[in-house]
């Protein structure tokens, strides 16, 4: 709406008097009986008549206007449309000005309750019998309420058109008659929404829509969440708040709705549900602890592992669960958690039924919304401990089997004939192997009931004092069981070494080769058999 700037009438009270014509086109009685404010001017703009309503509107005594004010020559007149409209009226054509703002707060105004208003002025000619204009009538209309209403409507329209939420209006049949740009964008229809019905927008929720419409008619408003079908066929989750619009008689004329897009909110809710689902069903127990050790959160795994319900856990502190922790150590514990940020250690926790379980614990310090927490991941390692024990047991069994195999390989005891066994030794002999030689010999002689034992050292590269002593101890041990010992494989250098060491080989039969030793043993066995001696 175009409006002029305010027109201050104070300068129009300047003395511009000229002889005012006395012949008005209307009688005084007719002028005062008009139901609207009217000012009558000559064709050159001089005001010559004002009725009482006009005087009341402008709050100016008519005596200060009649014969004084010239509406065309007033220097401060800012009604730019007046000259053209006035000239058109003189030419016989009526016209109306746009609304203009007038300020009457100057000396001479009557009444302090109203100092300004918005008016429109309609210009029309008073003609003589020949059709020539003799005067120009200026009919004034107070349009302040209309201007204010239009201003408010313009402001409201700007708010609606620029609102982030969608806003729509439907007639009582459910046909859309208005949608703001936001609603057009949300649905993807744009201006094509006009004329569509609610059944087009809510094909899957018509029962809900019908119920909401019935509620709106009964209560005047409704609120619900529903899905809106977009132009591309996708679904828009929306929060819809509607209300009934009424006509001047208070009867329902249409319905309006404010539509808020819930897509981002639903996405956040789904993300939170996914996070909660993940935490609750994590393989590890998860706790959130406050700085005093109170449990603020526990997942499903924690409840299952410890045998408590979640509600019960939230009434406990970490000291009710962790055996090694004491409440009076919490300050030191919390400082360590904050300082190290993340820590890994093992501990023991007590279940509700009193059973203790070993756990591996990771602690993390977190600050969230002004609160400090320790986030604890706890893993039951009972199965791991059992597996470790089984693995250690198996490892020990393997080692024992390997040692037995090595013993058999390093100290082989070979039956040669009935009552005769041979042990060919190959490689270096240390104290450990020497002990194995003695143990194997004693065990073999006893189990096989051998009468002759052959020790062959052909494969022993070095015979020193330790080896010599080991051989002597083995021979003496065998003799204590009542068996003979034949030592074979003594090479010249070995014989020289044994003599040099002063080794006493009395009581031990020696032969150069294993073959000679076997022959000796078998010959002796044969002689014993012929003589009947054992």
Image: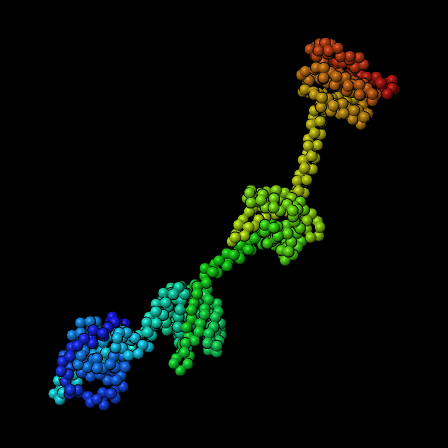
Nearest to the observer: residue 327 or residue 353: 327
Counting from the top left corner in percent of width and height, residue 106 is at 26, 74
In the image, is 46 to the left or to the right of 365? left
In the image, is 236 to the left or to the right of 34? right
Q: Residue at x 61, y 44 (%)?
A: 332
User: In which quadrant of the rendered view does residue 14 lie?
Assistant: bottom left
Q: Is residue 339 above or below residue 159?
A: above
In the image, is 433 to the left or to the right of 199? right
User: In which quadrant of the rendered view does residue 338 lie?
Assistant: top right
Q: Residue at x 25, y 71 (%)?
A: 6
**On-image quarter of the N terminus:** bottom left
Q: Is residue 128 above or below residue 357?
A: below
Counting from the top left corner in percent of width and height, residue 34 is at 25, 87
Q: Is residue 281 above or below residue 431?
A: below
Residue 416 appearing in the image: no
Q: Residue furthest left?
A: 130
Counting from the top left corner in percent of width and height, residue 59 is at 27, 79
Residue 435 appearing in the image: yes
**On-image quarter of the C terminus:** top right
Nearest to the observer: residue 203 or residue 438: 203
Nearest to the observer: residue 345 or residue 206: 345
User: In which quadrant of the rendered view does residue 345 lie?
Assistant: top right
In the image, is 261 to the left or to the right of 10? right
Report the colour scheme.
rainbow
Q: Residue at x 61, y 53 (%)?
A: 295
């Amino acid at each position: 709406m175009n409006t002029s700037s305010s027109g201050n009438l104070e300068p129009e009270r300047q003395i511009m008097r000229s002889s005012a014509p006395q012949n008005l086109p209307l009688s005084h009685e007719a002028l005062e009986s008009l139901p609207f404010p009217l000012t009558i001017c000559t064709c050159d703009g001089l005001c010559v008549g004002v009725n009482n309503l006009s005087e009341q509107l402008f709050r100016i005594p008519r005596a200060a206007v009649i014969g004084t004010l010239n509406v065309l020559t007033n220097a401060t007149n800012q009604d730019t449309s007046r000259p053209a409209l006035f000239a058109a009226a003189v030419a016989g054509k009526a016209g109306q000005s746009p609304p203009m703002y007038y300020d009457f707060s100057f000396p001479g105004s009557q009444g302090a309750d109203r100092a300004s208003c918005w008016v429109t002025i309609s210009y029309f000619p008073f003609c003589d019998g020949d059709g020539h204009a003799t005067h120009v009538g200026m009919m004034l209309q107070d349009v302040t309420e209309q201007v204010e209403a239009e201003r408010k409507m313009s402001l409201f329209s700007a708010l609606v058109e620029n609102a982030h939420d969608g806003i729509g209006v439907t007639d009582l049949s459910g046909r859309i008659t208005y949608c703001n740009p936001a609603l057009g964008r949300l649905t993807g229809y744009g201006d094509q929404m006009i004329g569509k019905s609610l059944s087009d927008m809510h094909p899957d929720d018509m029962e809900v829509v019908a119920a909401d419409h019935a509620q709106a008619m009964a209560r005047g408003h409704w609120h619900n969440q529903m899905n809106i079908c977009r132009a591309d066929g996708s679904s828009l989750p929306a929060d819809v708040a509607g209300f009934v619009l009424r006509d001047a008689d208070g009867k329902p004329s249409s319905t309006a709705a404010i539509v808020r897009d819930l897509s981002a909110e639903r996405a956040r809710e789904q993300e939170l549900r996914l996070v909660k689902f993940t935490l609750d069903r994590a393989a590890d127990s998860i706790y959130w602890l406050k700085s005093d050790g109170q449990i603020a959160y526990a997942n499903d795994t924690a409840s299952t592992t410890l045998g408590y319900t979640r509600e019960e856990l939230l009434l406990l502190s970490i000291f009710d669960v962790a055996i090694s922790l004491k409440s009076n150590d919490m300050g030191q514990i919390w400082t360590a958690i904050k300082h190290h940020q993340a820590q890994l250690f093992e501990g023991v926790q007590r279940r509700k039924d009193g059973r203790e379980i070993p756990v591996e614990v990771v602690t993390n310090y977190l600050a969230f919304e002004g609160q400090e927490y320790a986030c604890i991941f706890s893993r039951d390692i009972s199965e791991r401990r059992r597996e470790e024990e089984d693995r250690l047991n198996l490892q020990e069994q393997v080692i024992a089997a390997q040692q037995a195999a090595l013993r058999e390989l390093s100290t082989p005891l070979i039956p040669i004939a009935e009552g005769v066994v041979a042990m060919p030794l190959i490689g270096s002999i240390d104290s450990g192997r020497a002990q194995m030689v003695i143990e194997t010999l004693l065990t073999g002689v006893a189990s096989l009931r051998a009468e002759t034992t052959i020790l062959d050292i052909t494969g022993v590269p070095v015979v020193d004092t330790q080896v010599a002593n080991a051989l002597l101890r083995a021979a003496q041990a065998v003799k204590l069981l009542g068996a003979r010992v034949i030592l074979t494989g003594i090479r010249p250098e070995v014989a020289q070494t044994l003599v040099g060491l002063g080794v006493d080989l009395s009581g031990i039969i020696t032969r150069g080769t294993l073959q000679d030793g076997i022959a000796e043993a078998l010959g002796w066995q044969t002689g014993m058999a012929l003589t009947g001696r054992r």
